[in-house]
């Protein structure tokens, strides 16, 4: 499984565990007439990979990336261009990252660095969402 697929899958599972109904904008392979191979098209909803709806909370629009900080910055710029109503929506970029487990040097501790539009995309270590063991396999 590629890093971005794994990141989107883990993010979806984490939101569902919080009680959200999650729509996942999955890429589709399409055959193009005259081309010898299929191409992959992604149909993100307003540049977001996941749209999460909860009956008592604000809707969450989440763009997931397994890339670098600059990849996250590019996604933030795209999301800023849209007219969001933050009274009803949370707009977030989740960047998958890891650090070494201090008790076991061969093990990775995965987490999402979460950047929120309403906070001006500021990020601190308090904005980390650890990926639970029930969601990911230890590596």
Image (spheres, rainbow, N blue to C red):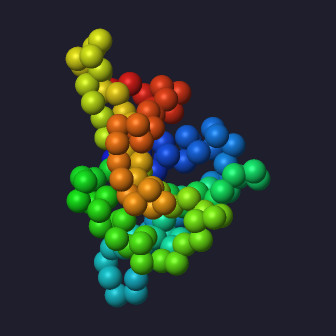
Query: In which image quadrant can residue 104 be found?
Result: top left
Where is residue 100? Give x, y as percent. 25, 25
Residue drawn where x is 42% and y is 78% of the image: 81
User: Residue 109 location, x and y as percent?
Assistant: 34, 28
Residue 1 location, quadrant: top left
Q: Which residue is drawn at 40% across and 60% down?
A: 120
Indicate the quadrant containing the C terminus: top left, top right, bottom left or bottom right: top left
Return the residue nearer the eye: 109 or 125: 125
Q: Residue furthest top?
A: 103
Q: Could you say which quadrant of the image residue 130 lies in?
A: top left
62 w.r.t. 81: above or below: above
Residue 63 in the image, given as x and y percentages of width and height: 44, 59
Left or right: where does residue 8 sit relative to residue 37? right
Res 26 seen here = no
Q: In the image shown, does 3 or 125 lie closer to the viewer? A: 125
Q: Which residue lies furthest to the right in this view?
A: 55
Seen at 59% across and 71% down, the residue is: 85
Residue 22 vs 73, above or below: the answer is above
Q: Can residue 82 be seen in this view?
A: yes
Instruction: Pick out the residue farthest to the bottom.
Output: 34
Residue drawn where x is 29% and y is 62% of the image? 73
Residue 49 image offset from top left, x and y in percent = 49, 61
From the viewer's side, name the closer residue of 71 and 37: 71
Q: Is residue 61 above or below residue 102?
A: below
How many discs appear?
0
């Amino acid at each position: 499984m590629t890093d971005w697929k794994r990141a989107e899958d883990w993010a979806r599972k984490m939101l569902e565990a919080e009680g959200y109904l999650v729509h996942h904008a999955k890429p589709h392979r399409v055959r193009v007439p005259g081309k010898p191979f299929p191409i992959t098209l992604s149909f993100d909803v307003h540049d977001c990979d996941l749209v999460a709806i909860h009956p008592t909370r604000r809707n969450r629009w989440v763009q997931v990336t397994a890339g670098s900080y600059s990849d996250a910055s590019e996604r933030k710029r795209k999301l800023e261009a849209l007219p969001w109503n933050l009274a009803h929506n949370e707009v977030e970029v989740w960047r998958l990252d890891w650090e070494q487990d201090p008790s076991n040097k061969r093990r990775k501790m995965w987490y999402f660095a979460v950047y929120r539009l309403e906070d001006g995309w500021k990020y601190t270590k308090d904005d980390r969402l650890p990926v639970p063991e029930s969601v990911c396999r230890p590596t």
